[in-house]
Amino acid sequence: MIIQTELFWGLIILTIIIHFIDTLSYSVRLNSVKSGNFALSLSLFNMIALTSRTANTFQGPLIGKLIDSSINMSYDPITYIRQVVFASTIGTAVGILFIPTFLRIFSKAVSKLEVSGSVPGLVVQSLSMGNIKGIAKNVMRPKRGMLRGLRFKNIPKRILLLNALITGVYTIGVLAAYYSAIYVPENRLAASASSGMINGIASILLTLFIDPRAALITDEAYRGKREYGDVKALVIMLIGTKLIGTLLGQLLLVPGAKLIAFFYG
């Protein structure tokens, strides 16, 4: 392998972790509606999301090192970059399979947080051997019955298409920016620095077009104006389109990198 093995696998594992946690975050809506503990659910979720964002900060330097090594060796690392994008698909798929288990554990964690009143205290308590064994006992397998009777037609299709597209951009934002340095090695720093701007735009689009509509459906279900099944259908369709978005990222990767390189060429 031309690229350092440790560097490459570190990047793969980080990407899987980031998208695994990001996928699980979609299901927090289900717990907040079912338990009614919106504030507590949000507090615990923020800790989980922080883990994902922290992992994301380590991803950039690893990609940068991979691209620098490739430029020095006059080598096109597109195969490795595509494998990293595929790792995001793996992380999302594993996250989807783990959602039933996560919801059961998350529900119990929210109840314990209500008693302890401290996220750090909850973390310390969770690290005890007894609680670790308890987590293993709460593992649930996804079943087809979980999808039965859901009214998918009540979910706006526009936000699902947007979610797939925006997820595709978010998936390859950092990778495309760093990979664009292959086309403009003389301006590699400027090109790679655009990664924050791309992910920032994707985050803004999610905030403007996806989150408000999803929050409205969740809020209506909590107030009894919608069935709980509508929130469940929403979550399933959002994580489904997120998975599609990671696959779409494969198609957007090279065109995105060339577009970035065009502005710095």
Image: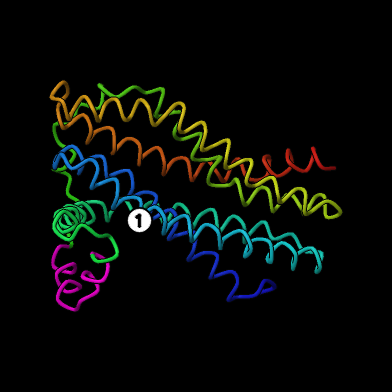
Mark 1: secondary structure:
helix
Quarter of the image that includes the N terminus: bottom right
Q: Give the colour scheme of this rendering.
A: rainbow
77 or 33: which is nearer to us? 33
Residue 87 vertical position relative to residue 265 in the rendered view, above or below = below
- Residue at figure coordinates x 51%, y 54% from the top left: 86
Does residue 175 appear to the left or right of 51 in the view shown? right
Q: Is residue 187 magenta?
A: no
In which quarter of the view is residue 237 placed?
A: top left
Residue 233 percent location from the top left of the image: 24, 33
Instruction: Give the image location of residue 110, x and y in percent.
Output: 19, 53
Image height of 102 relative to 204, above or below:
below
- Left or right side of 213 for 104: left
* Magenta stretch encompasses residue 136: yes
Q: How many marks?
A: 1
Q: List the residue tagged with mark 1.
A: 48
Magenta-drawn segment: 122-138
Q: Which corner quadrant holds the C terminus?
A: top right
Kind of residue indicated by mark 1 = Ile
Give neighbour class at mark 1: few <14, some 14-19, many 20+ (Cα, 10 Å): some
Name the residue at the bottom extreme. Answer: 129
Along the line of sight, which residue is nearer the eye, 147 or 135?
Answer: 135
Which residue is at a point 56% across and 63% down the rendered structure image?
58
Q: Which residue is most to the front?
A: 117
Q: Nearer the viewer, residue 181 or 202?
A: 202
Please name whichever residue, 95 or 200, is drawn nearer the observer in this view of the structure.
Answer: 200
Measuring 15% from the left and 25% from the top, which residue is drawn there? 223
The percent position of residue 175, horizontal first and vertical second, equals 62, 52
Left/right of residue 5 with respect to residue 193 in the rendered view = left
Determine whether, in the image, residue 57 is placed left or right of residue 150. right
Residue 73 location (% of width, % of height):
80, 69
